[in-house]
Amino acid sequence: MSRKATLIIILIVSLLSVSLVYGSYQANTQVAEGETRYESIGTALEVIALVKTRHYFQPVSTFELVKAYVTHGTINGMLKHALDDPYTRHMDAIAFENMMNTTTGIYGGIGLSVGIADDRV
Protein backbone atom coordinates (compact mmCIF):
# COMPACT_ATOMS: atom_id res chain seq x y z
CA MET A 1 0.00 0.00 0.00
CA SER A 2 1.32 3.43 -0.81
CA ARG A 3 2.19 5.98 1.81
CA LYS A 4 -0.62 8.29 0.63
CA ALA A 5 -3.28 5.55 0.98
CA THR A 6 -2.03 4.66 4.46
CA LEU A 7 -2.19 8.31 5.50
CA ILE A 8 -5.77 8.63 4.20
CA ILE A 9 -6.87 5.49 6.07
CA ILE A 10 -5.27 6.73 9.31
CA LEU A 11 -6.96 10.11 8.87
CA ILE A 12 -10.40 8.53 8.28
CA VAL A 13 -10.06 6.20 11.27
CA SER A 14 -8.96 9.12 13.46
CA LEU A 15 -11.91 11.27 12.37
CA LEU A 16 -14.36 8.42 13.00
CA SER A 17 -12.86 7.80 16.44
CA VAL A 18 -13.09 11.47 17.41
CA SER A 19 -16.70 11.72 16.19
CA LEU A 20 -17.64 8.53 18.08
CA VAL A 21 -16.12 9.82 21.33
CA TYR A 22 -17.74 13.24 20.91
CA GLY A 23 -21.12 11.67 20.05
CA SER A 24 -20.96 9.45 23.13
CA TYR A 25 -20.13 12.44 25.29
CA GLN A 26 -23.04 14.47 23.87
CA ALA A 27 -25.47 11.57 24.24
CA ASN A 28 -24.54 11.01 27.87
CA THR A 29 -24.95 14.66 28.81
CA GLN A 30 -28.54 14.87 27.51
CA VAL A 31 -30.19 12.26 29.74
CA ALA A 32 -33.06 13.26 32.02
CA GLU A 33 -32.41 13.15 35.74
CA GLY A 34 -33.05 9.74 37.27
CA GLU A 35 -32.54 7.84 34.03
CA THR A 36 -29.50 6.01 32.78
CA ARG A 37 -28.71 6.05 29.09
CA TYR A 38 -29.02 2.73 27.32
CA GLU A 39 -30.50 0.74 30.14
CA SER A 40 -30.26 -3.02 29.94
CA ILE A 41 -31.12 -4.10 26.40
CA GLY A 42 -32.82 -7.15 27.90
CA THR A 43 -35.16 -4.93 29.90
CA ALA A 44 -35.87 -2.78 26.84
CA LEU A 45 -36.71 -5.85 24.76
CA GLU A 46 -38.96 -7.16 27.53
CA VAL A 47 -40.83 -3.83 27.64
CA ILE A 48 -41.19 -3.85 23.84
CA ALA A 49 -42.57 -7.40 23.95
CA LEU A 50 -45.06 -6.49 26.69
CA VAL A 51 -46.26 -3.40 24.84
CA LYS A 52 -46.64 -5.41 21.62
CA THR A 53 -48.36 -8.46 23.08
CA ARG A 54 -50.71 -7.43 25.80
CA HIS A 55 -50.31 -4.14 27.57
CA TYR A 56 -51.25 -1.42 25.13
CA PHE A 57 -54.66 -0.59 23.74
CA GLN A 58 -53.69 0.16 20.13
CA PRO A 59 -51.30 -1.43 17.63
CA VAL A 60 -47.72 -0.21 17.93
CA SER A 61 -44.93 -0.68 15.40
CA THR A 62 -41.96 -2.65 16.71
CA PHE A 63 -39.76 -0.59 14.41
CA GLU A 64 -41.02 2.66 16.00
CA LEU A 65 -40.36 1.31 19.50
CA VAL A 66 -36.81 0.21 18.65
CA LYS A 67 -36.12 3.46 16.78
CA ALA A 68 -37.34 5.51 19.76
CA TYR A 69 -35.17 3.46 22.14
CA VAL A 70 -32.07 3.94 19.99
CA THR A 71 -32.80 7.65 19.56
CA HIS A 72 -33.56 8.45 23.21
CA GLY A 73 -31.53 5.76 24.94
CA THR A 74 -33.98 5.18 27.78
CA ILE A 75 -37.04 3.01 28.14
CA ASN A 76 -39.18 5.91 29.34
CA GLY A 77 -37.94 8.02 26.43
CA MET A 78 -38.90 5.19 24.08
CA LEU A 79 -42.39 4.89 25.57
CA LYS A 80 -42.98 8.64 25.64
CA HIS A 81 -42.04 9.22 22.01
CA ALA A 82 -43.18 5.99 20.35
CA LEU A 83 -46.56 5.77 22.08
CA ASP A 84 -47.28 9.49 22.42
CA ASP A 85 -48.97 8.70 25.75
CA PRO A 86 -48.02 10.88 28.74
CA TYR A 87 -49.32 8.31 31.24
CA THR A 88 -47.34 5.26 30.11
CA ARG A 89 -43.99 4.81 31.81
CA HIS A 90 -41.66 2.05 32.93
CA MET A 91 -40.85 1.70 36.62
CA ASP A 92 -37.83 -0.21 37.84
CA ALA A 93 -38.12 -2.32 41.00
CA ILE A 94 -37.16 0.55 43.33
CA ALA A 95 -39.62 3.01 41.76
CA PHE A 96 -42.38 0.38 41.89
CA GLU A 97 -41.68 -0.34 45.56
CA ASN A 98 -41.76 3.38 46.38
CA MET A 99 -45.05 3.78 44.52
CA MET A 100 -46.56 0.82 46.37
CA ASN A 101 -45.42 2.23 49.73
CA THR A 102 -47.03 5.61 49.06
CA THR A 103 -50.31 4.22 47.68
CA THR A 104 -50.91 1.33 50.09
CA GLY A 105 -52.85 1.98 53.25
CA ILE A 106 -55.15 0.54 55.85
CA TYR A 107 -58.70 1.74 55.84
CA GLY A 108 -60.98 1.24 58.82
CA GLY A 109 -64.69 1.48 59.40
CA ILE A 110 -67.53 -0.04 61.33
CA GLY A 111 -68.84 -2.27 58.54
CA LEU A 112 -72.39 -1.01 58.16
CA SER A 113 -74.62 -2.04 55.29
CA VAL A 114 -77.81 -0.18 54.43
CA GLY A 115 -80.63 -2.00 52.70
CA ILE A 116 -84.40 -2.33 52.41
CA ALA A 117 -86.27 -4.86 54.55
CA ASP A 118 -90.06 -4.97 54.86
CA ASP A 119 -90.34 -1.80 52.77
CA ARG A 120 -88.20 0.08 55.27
CA VAL A 121 -84.65 1.36 55.01
Image (cartoon, grey):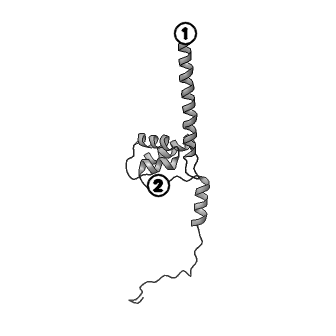
Give the residue at mark 2. 88
From where the camera sits, is residue 26 visible?
A: yes
Q: Residue at the location (46% across, 40% down)?
A: 66
Residue 46 location, x and y as percent? 52, 44
Could you tell me which secondary element the residue under label 1 belongs to? loop
Quarter holding the C terminus is bottom left
Residue occupied by mark 1? 2
- Which is nearer the N-term, disc 1 or disc 2? 1
In the image, residue 3 sits, relative to residue 83, either above or below, namely: above
Horizontal and vertical percent position of residue 77: 49, 48
Query: Residue at 42% across / 41% down in the picture?
Result: 62
Whether residue 54 is situated above or below residue 70 in the rendered picture: below
- Classify residue 49 as left or right of residue 38: left
Is residue 32 toward the left or the right of residue 121 in the image? right
Callout 2 amino acid: Thr
Badge 1 amino acid? Ser
Between residue 84 and residue 9, name the one nearer to us: 9
What residue is drawn where x is 55% and y is 22%? Answer: 11
Image coordinates for residue 102, horizontal then vertical, percent: 59, 65
Q: Is residue 38 visible?
A: no
Give the alpha-carbon distance from disc 1 to disc 2, as whole Å.
Answer: 58 Å
